[in-house]
Amino acid sequence: MQQPDHDRNWLAGARCTVLGANGFIGTNLCLALQSAGATVIGAGRSASARAELADKVSWRRTDLATGTGLDDAIRGSDFVIHLVNTLLPAPSNAEKARDVEENLIGTLRLLELCREHRVKKVIYASSGGTVYGPQSVVPISENVIPLPICSYGIVKHAVEGYLHLFRHLHQLDYVALRIANPFGEYQMPHDQGLIATLFGKALSRTPISIWGDGSVVRDYVYIQDVVDAAIASMALDTQHAPRVFNIGSGVGKSVNDVIESITHVHGKLPRVEYTPGRAADVPVNVLDIRRAYDHLGWRPQTDWQAALDITYRWLSNVLDANETARAYAATA
């Protein structure tokens, strides 16, 4: 087992390009890398970095779908962390060709540039939920045959295959992280994510609408644990170690379980409304995370209730600040 390097001193001076830096995972990862002494290139479709990153990253405007700006963003980088996806899982089945063109072909274009610029390693954010699809054995290990039921998961799995091919043909090292359902700071209610959405509804006293009857089970993992996993994967240098890892809590919680836990944090919730389920939703998805411990020395460190408390406090402060700013603007 590789031992985790908790002090992260090895990152000092490393040049890291984070694609999707303004997003939820990207923001947290950029902050951690910069704090560890890395030079961080933030990249994304926005014209500039979000306020929290403005003085911590060097920004590059890029577009994965067209390849615009990618060459400049990764030139000279040791690590490229690929967090971009232009579609969400549920709508992806309606736009399968677009999914392939933008996310699969766009990533192939990116990998060719990484090869040309001699990037040491690519870290890819795959999907611990959609890649596997319905599985009869839970928790799900990396050894099962993936059975994705949405284009999003099919494309994610295809990218993993091309990463393996580029390592075989061109010695471009990589790690693919099959991330479960992350939550925490910098995830807003309008983003993808049940927990942020539920907290947002609770704080705004808005009725909560749930797909299905609330029995769908997922694996939820706190964002700082995801960041730790990403950094541990950057440090992996064992030649024959696996390159695909599940990153989750290893514990399943139904939507109704999550609602109950959030009630403990917030108090009484607004009305909960149940609507018909979606075809793209797998009934149960819980990840076996033993491989990540065996080879990365990683396991989640944050207690479920403590992580919810941290998330709730952060989101409460942000939403309060936003409301104050809107009220001020209305009277100005």
Image (spheres, grey):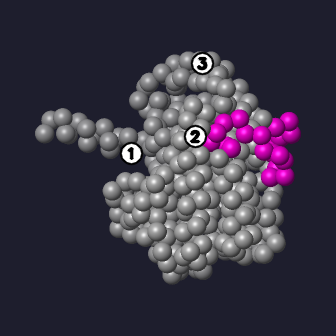
Q: Main secondary structure of the magenta part?
A: loop
Q: Secondary structure at mark 1?
A: helix
Q: Earlier in the sequence, mark 1 or mark 3?
A: 3
Relative vertical location of residue 143 with respect to residue 267 in this rendering, above or below: below
List the residue tagged with mark 1: 318
Q: Nearer the viewer, residue 220 or 175?
A: 175
* Quarter of the image that includes the C terminus: top left
User: 154 left or right of 62?
Assistant: right
Q: Nearer the viewer, mark 2 or mark 1?
A: 2
List the residue tagged with mark 2: 97
Report the magenta residues as a range. 135-154
**Labels 2 and 1 touching (C-beta < 8 A):** no
Q: What whole-number distance in Å separates the C-alpha atoms at marks 2 and 3?
A: 32 Å
Q: Earlier in the sequence, mark 2 or mark 3?
A: 2
* Quarter of the image that includes the N terminus: bottom right
**Quadrant in which residue 263 is drawn:** top right
Residue 168 is at least partly visible in this image? yes
Q: Is residue 251 magenta?
A: no
List the residue tagged with mark 3: 274
Q: Is residue 138 magenta?
A: yes
Residue 194 is at least partly visible in this image? no
Three-letter code for the amino acid on which mark 1 is drawn: Val
Name the residue: 41% across, 68% down: 57
Q: Nearer the viewer, mark 2 or mark 3?
A: 2
State the image coordinates of residue 211 (x, y, percent, origin top left): 61, 24
Three-letter code for the amino acid on which mark 3 is drawn: Tyr
Three-letter code for the amino acid on which mark 2 is drawn: Ala
